[in-house]
């Protein structure tokens, strides 16, 4: 199994090397090849996503990505900025399925904006369609309104649009993820079918795909209700699948439930199983090079990679259990520190996960 390792900028190299250490401790046959991306690639090759990096990713089974970006590149032309590397990878690798788990460890539940009892033990997965919907639908633009109450006034418009194969493939991904998670085996499909034709179509197609997965329960929920239920009783969910725009909003809402940016992994997958795995946070230039960054989001991203791209669910379970164990032992990086715990840096945190494994 070949992994393209792209550490990137800022804290990227520090957190990725801890995740690599954890992967090496698993005794799997993993070939890991490093390449430059983001600002680091711009410095070396004049482009944030050089052809060699892209072709390495295309030839790999999975990509482990740190983070990119630094304020010093803010004045570069947009296409040369480090963040363009992520958009380029999404586009070239056709990463249409974005996975964002929201996991809240019992011992970190005080960091949530909700009451601890509502979020302690939370473990839900939001799957967002990433390459369609109103963000990409054509036509879009501005014009003079041709008719209606405001005929003759300037107006702007976007088009919400989904093609059947786009819905089918994201629905399959969601049902398969629910199967692999082995928890409540329930998918909640979120839409606005009471108002939008696109959503009614989404709902019809998800129902059809559901027929292939008799062991998985399916429920449909309107997006306004889903937004409410996520803060009322988030633990009732297992897997949520939704379109690009609703997913954009709900995944951020769910992330904040857990209270800690240094703990949140993410994955973006295509239909060959190739995926890009990265922490949800950025390159944190304010703490880069100081050994303060929390590597757990990246280590948990590596666990997702084992489960979703490399078919190593047991190894993924082991890594996730090891992360829980170091949290239970009271080890905390700065971002999750609370009184009475042991404050540790990036490397000792990675070492503790390896020691547990
Ligand atoms: P950020 O996520 O990098 O940092 C926000 C805050 O969280 C900072 O105080 C940082 O110190 C802290 N933080 C982030 N990750 C942490 C970790 N693992 N451990 C401890 N603390 C952590 O967001 P930002 O400051 O808005 O952006 C910084 C740079 O990152 C920008 O150039 C931005 O464009 C880029 N960015 C990249 C990605 C990505 O690579 N996918 C995502 C978001 C932002």
Image: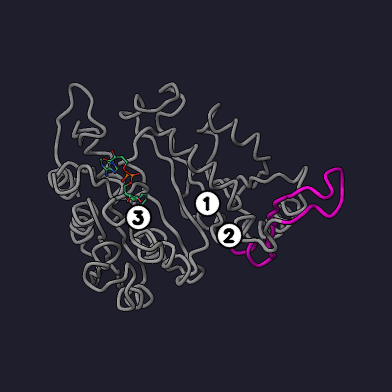
- Residue 237 appears in which quarter of the rendering? top right
* Residue shown at 49% from the left, 69% from the top: 94
* Residue shown at 77% from the left, 44% from the top: 195
Disc 1/disc 2 C-alpha distance (Å): 8 Å
Residue 127 badge:
1
Residue 289 in the image: state x and y as whole percent: 14, 49
Pointer 3 local density, CA inside 10 Å: few below 14, some 14–19, many at least 20: many
The first of marks 3 and 2 along the sequence is: 2
* Residue shown at 15% from the left, 44% from the top: 352
* Residue shown at 23% from the left, 25% from the top: 338
Q: Which residue in the structure is indicated by mark 2?
A: 170
Q: Which residues are magenta?
A: 143-171
Q: Which residue in the structure is indicated by mark 3?
A: 278
Up the image or down, 207 lies above or below 260; here it is below
Residue farthest right in this picture: 148
Residue 295 badge:
none
Badges 1 and 2: C-beta atoms under 8 Å apart?
Answer: yes
Say whether mark 3 is within 8 Å of ligand 1. Answer: yes
The first of marks 3 and 1 along the sequence is: 1
Pointer 2 local density, CA inside 10 Å: few below 14, some 14–19, many at least 20: many
Helix, strand or loop status at disc 1:
strand
- Residue 161 appears in which quarter of the rendering? bottom right
Disc 3/disc 1 C-alpha distance (Å): 15 Å
């Amino acid at each position: 199994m070949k992994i393209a390792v792209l550490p990137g900028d800022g804290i990227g190299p520090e957190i990725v090397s801890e995740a690599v250490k954890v992967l090496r401790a698993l005794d799997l046959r993993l070939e890991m090849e490093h390449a430059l991306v983001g600002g680091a690639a711009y410095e070396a090759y004049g482009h944030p996503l050089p052809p060699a990096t892209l072709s390495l990713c295309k030839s790999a089974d999975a990509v482990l990505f740190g983070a990119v970006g630094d304020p010093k590149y803010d004045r570069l032309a947009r296409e040369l900025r480090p963040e363009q590397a992520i958009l380029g990878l999404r586009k070239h690798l056709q990463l249409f399925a974005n996975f964002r788990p929201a996991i809240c460890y019992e011992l970190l539940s005080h960091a949530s904006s909700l009451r601890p009892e509502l979020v302690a033990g939370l473990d839900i997965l939001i799957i967002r369609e990433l390459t369609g919907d109103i963000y990409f639908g054509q036509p879009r633009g501005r014009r003079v309104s041709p008719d209606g109450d405001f005929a003759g006034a300037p107006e702007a418009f976007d088009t919400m649009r989904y093609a059947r194969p786009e819905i089918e493939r994201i629905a399959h991904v969601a049902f398969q993820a629910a199967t692999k998670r082995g928890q409540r085996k329930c998918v909640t499909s979120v839409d606005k079918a009471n108002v939008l034709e696109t959503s009614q179509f989404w709902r019809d197609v998800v129902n059809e795909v559901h027929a292939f997965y008799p062991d998985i329960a399916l429920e449909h929920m309107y997006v306004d209700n889903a937004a409410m239920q996520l803060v009322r009783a988030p633990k009732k969910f297992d897997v949520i699948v939704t379109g690009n725009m609703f997913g954009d909003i709900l995944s951020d809402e769910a992330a904040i439930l857990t209270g800690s940016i240094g703990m949140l992994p993410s994955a973006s997958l295509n239909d060959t199983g190739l995926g890009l795995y990265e922490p949800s946070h950025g390159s944190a230039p304010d703490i880069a090079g100081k050994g303060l960054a929390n590597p757990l989001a990246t280590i948990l991203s590596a666990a997702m990679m084992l489960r979703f791209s490399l078919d190593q669910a047991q190894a993924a379970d082991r890594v996730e259990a090891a992360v829980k164990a170091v949290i239970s032992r009271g080890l905390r990086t700065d971002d999750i520190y609370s009184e009475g715990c042991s404050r540790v840096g990036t490397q000792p945190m990675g070492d503790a996960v390896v020691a547990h494994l």
